[in-house]
Image (cartoon, rainbow, N blue to C red):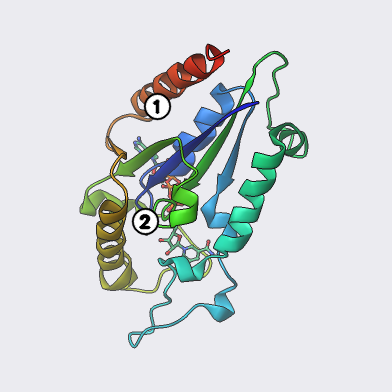
Amino acid sequence: MRTLVVGIGGMTNGGKSTMSSSLHLRIPNSCIIAQDAFFKDDSVIAVDSNGFKQYDVLDALHMDRMMSKIESWRKDPGSFLASQSLRTQCSVGEEVFVLIVEGFLIFNYGPLNELMDMRYFLEIPYDVCKDRRGSRVYTPPDLPGYFDGYVWPRYLKNRQEMEDMVSDIVFLDGLKSKEDLLDYVYGDVTMEIQSLMGKD
Ligand SMILES: Nc1ncnc2c1ncn2[C@@H]1O[C@H](COP(=O)(O)OP(=O)(O)OP(=O)(O)O)[C@@H](O)[C@H]1O
Ligand SMILES: NC(=O)c1ccc[n+]([C@@H]2O[C@H](CO)[C@@H](O)[C@H]2O)c1
């Protein structure tokens, strides 16, 4: 059985969900596991001296649960796919199962990073990131000053840590159009699938 794990990482609002869901729709036998689904309950998230909730760290996430879910895909991707929602597209005869792992801290977690076959990171400039983030409503909503006082400085730290840990990441300019970005990653993934299919 052949499998491929594609990591779609990136900054907050870099376009990860957009890219991942479009990729999923184009790639047969693919599914998405998104890191945002594994945030701990708000009541256990640490708060700093400014009153800012410390959401942008691995400690805010149930990474153990995320890894268990990925493990169940790895054990039996066919059954995992079948247990997914109606959106899942199964294609008989396609032999490579593709897992799209999406999230803002996927490469910072060693055991998860190790499982990736392909790594992408969507980046956008500070002002675009701040604008996009400002038009989103999280639960709980961002406090005034949260972006400059917490999200951005924390991103810079997370990014440095990621670059110190991982070298083979393809950085993508998130200012390009959704279509161009998708075409690029889809082209790469398709080539990899073809190459895996030719392996026996
Ligand atoms: N290439 C693009 N060009 C312009 N806007 C984009 C592009 N990709 C995504 N967007 C827009 O940016 C916003 C954030 O996109 P998306 O939700 O995909 O980001 P994200 O990285 O998953 O964010 P988060 O992880 O913080 O939820 C959305 O409004 C989306 O429509
Ligand atoms: N529980 C959530 O999903 C949640 C709550 C508060 C903030 N966030 C933000 O999500 C981003 C990652 O996609 C991070 O920058 C968090 O601040 C998420």
Q: Determine the image quadrant of residue 109.
A: bottom left
**Callout 2: CB less than 8 Å from ligand 1:** yes
Secondary-structure class at tag 2? helix
Left or right of 132? Residue 156 is left
Quadrant assignment for the N terminus:
top right
Identified by mark 2, the residue type is: Arg
Q: Which mark is residue 133?
A: 2
Q: Is residue 46 above or below residue 175?
A: below
Q: Quadrant of ligand 1?
A: top left
Residue 57, how many percent across, how many down? 41, 67
Q: Nearer the viewer, residue 101 or 53?
A: 101
Residue 126 can be seen in this image: yes
Q: How many marks?
A: 2
Q: Which mark is residue 34?
A: none
Q: Is residue 152 above or below residue 8?
A: below
Left or right of 150? Residue 79 is right
Of the residues under marks 1 and 2, which one precedes in the sequence? Answer: 2
Residue 148, how many percent across, how many down? 25, 68
**Callout 1: CB less than 8 Å from ligand 1:** no
Q: Nearer the viewer, residue 114 or 52?
A: 114
The residue positioned 38% from the left and 50% from the top of the image is: 13
Q: Nearer the viewer, mark 1 or mark 2?
A: 1
Residue denoted by label 1:
185
Q: Nearer the viewer, residue 150 or 27?
A: 27
